[in-house]
Image: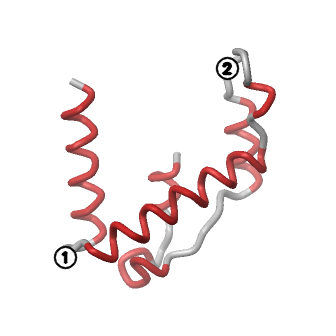
Amino acid sequence: MFQKELTWQPDLELLKNKMEFAPDEDTLDGMVMSVPFVHGSENVGKEWIKEVFGRLLDIYRKEIKKYDGSVALYLADKSQKLKATAS
């Protein structure tokens, strides 16, 4: 969901490592409602999700700052690496 929200940002290529965003209320509501009922799921709320998004955004900013290509290439590269590790 983080990548989906990130790629919806209109100035993503322009702002690169200066990107700022947070999930909107509808996204947060949907994410909270989709958490499966498992041990610990009561701890997953809007604030927790916002914190995780913030951490992921920090990681993205650090990595994209060092990346020579476009944001689109960075995301494609990350996507391929995730697929390779999942197989």
Residue 81 higher or lower than 34, as above or below: below
- Residue 29 at what x, y percent from top left? 76, 42
Quadrant position of the C terminus in the picture? top left
68 vs 54: above or below: below
Per the image, label 2 sits on a secondary structure element best described as: loop
In the displayed structure image, the side of residue 62 where residue 48 appears, left or right: right
Residue under numbered circle 2: 36
Q: Can you give x and y, in whole percent of width and height, for residue 31 in the image?
A: 67, 38
Earlier in the chain: of badge 2 and badge 1, it is 2
Q: Nearer the viewer, mark 2 or mark 1?
A: 1
Q: Residue at x 60, y 60 (%)?
A: 54
Residue 62 position within the rendered picture, expressed as x and y whole percent measured from the top left: 40, 70
Q: Nearer the viewer, residue 46 or 34?
A: 46
Rendered position, 25 above or below 60: above
Q: Nearer the viewer, residue 72 or 54?
A: 54
The residue at the point 33 percent across, 70 percent down is: 64
Instruction: Say left or right for 1 vs 15.
Output: right
Query: Tags 2 and 1 in contact by the CB under 8 Å rule?
Result: no
Q: Residue furthest top?
A: 38
Q: Residues within 10 Å of mark 2 (few under 14, many from 20)?
A: few
- Left or right, 17 with respect to 31, comes to left
Is the residue 85 above or below the residue 72 in the image? above
Residue 67 locus on image (x, y percent): 24, 72
The residue to which callout 1 is attached is 68
Which residue is at 42% across, 74% downward? Answer: 12
Label 1 Cα crowd, 10 Å radius (few <14 / some 14-19 / many 20+):
few
